[in-house]
Image (spheres, rainbow, N blue to C red):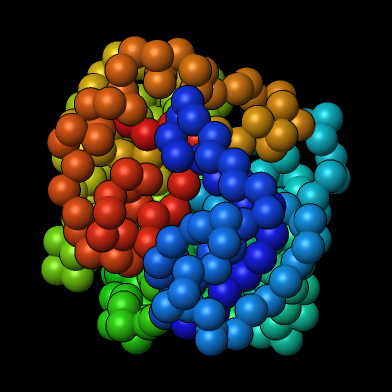
Amino acid sequence: MKLIHADIVYSEDREHLAVHPDSYIAVEKGIVKGIWPEIPEEYSSVPLTDHGDAVLIPAFSDLHVHAPQYPNRGLQMDLLLSDWLDNCTFPLEAKYADAEFARLVYDAFVDDMIANGTMHACVYGTIHTEATSYLLETMDRRGIKGYVGKINMDRSAPEDLLEDPEESIRATEAFLEKYSGNRNTRPILTPRFAPTCTRGLISGLGKLGRKYEVGMQTHLVESLWEAEQARLLFPECSCDTEIYERAGLMDNGPVIGGHFIFPSEEDIRIMQKYDSYAVQCPDATISVIAGIMQTGTLLDRGNEDRSRQRHICRSSYRCLHTGCPRCAAVQTQAIL
């Protein structure tokens, strides 16, 4: 048990901000026991940390971040998404085959997350198991709650970033087995996006999702180019999101779709059906000239209330729902 004194501010929900000036918060084993203007008698002997008139807020949450892209932030922002991947991101990600390079970058990445108050995160690694394992272990050891994914790709990328689909599935399963019992940071399935995955690879990931009851993060309708490529490569599917639904990837744990800029009505319907999470990334998608997710419109259509009514808790680490009383919930910009 510990007590902290400060001006305490947090959001109760989308519409309400709770403000407790000059107050005391009691925390035991990571659970807030209460907030009071004066220290209750029963807590009078508890050690107190006094921050004076500083403002105390919950830690930040980042539901879509690429750790390997940390060194190239701000570079070549004049390119469209496909060109930016080919000219900037893929060449950088190939360097994570070097475990020492990965350690240097990921140590700096985690240091900066913590220094800036981000203590919940859903993070993309690369295809490289050793490097991604180091990232997950480092986050877990330093107390960051969330998920890390080993990316899966077997087409439409440079040769040194392509995986044999069977080997990709084997490596991903070993990754799941090794880290699913972690205290803070756990694995999540991470097909990069539909244009870089064959049917066989996505189908194999769906089987792993069901076997290990693990969720998925990916990019959904991120750009007009990506959405069109998904339809061309999976013509049996009416939209990007249906690809993952058909593979059985939508109902095993949290589903986190990054960007979600150009959804069709069917994309939105499927995301609603599985209480999935659409995460806006406005700085990134403005920089690569893609667009901005219509967060307000999605929320105003009643998606948030519908999700809360249908929510079923999947335990403190698998459930990301903001309103669940049982969960160490990670916040998001839009709940579908």
User: Does residue 212 appear to the left or right of 144 in the view shown?
Assistant: left
* Residue at the (66%, 84%) spot, across then down: 99
- Image location of residue 93, percent across then percent down: 66, 62
Foreground residue among 118 and 264: 118
User: Does residue 68 appear to the left or right of 143 in the view shown?
Assistant: right
- Image location of residue 242, percent across then percent down: 24, 32
User: Does residue 144 appear to the left or right of 185 in the view shown?
Assistant: right
In the figure, 225 relative to 210: above or below?
above
Foreground residue among 247 and 298: 298
In the figure, 273 relative to 8: above or below?
above
Q: Residue furthest front?
A: 41
Count every numbered label the image shows and give the total. 0
Foreground residue among 259 and 24: 24
Residue 328 shows up from this direction: yes
Q: Quadrant of the C terminus?
A: top left
Location of residue 33 (image quadrant): bottom left
- Image location of residue 96, percent across then percent down: 66, 73
User: Does residue 28 appear to the left or right of 89 in the view shown?
Assistant: left
Foreground residue among 333 and 219: 333
- Image location of residue 58, percent across then percent down: 57, 55
* Residue at the (84%, 40%) spot, across then down: 76
In the figure, 43 relative to 114: above or below?
below
* Residue at the (48%, 69%) spot, across then down: 40
In the figure, 328 relative to 269: above or below?
below
Residue 128 shows up from this direction: no
* Residue at the (79%, 50%) spot, across then down: 73
Location of residue 227 (image quadrant): top left
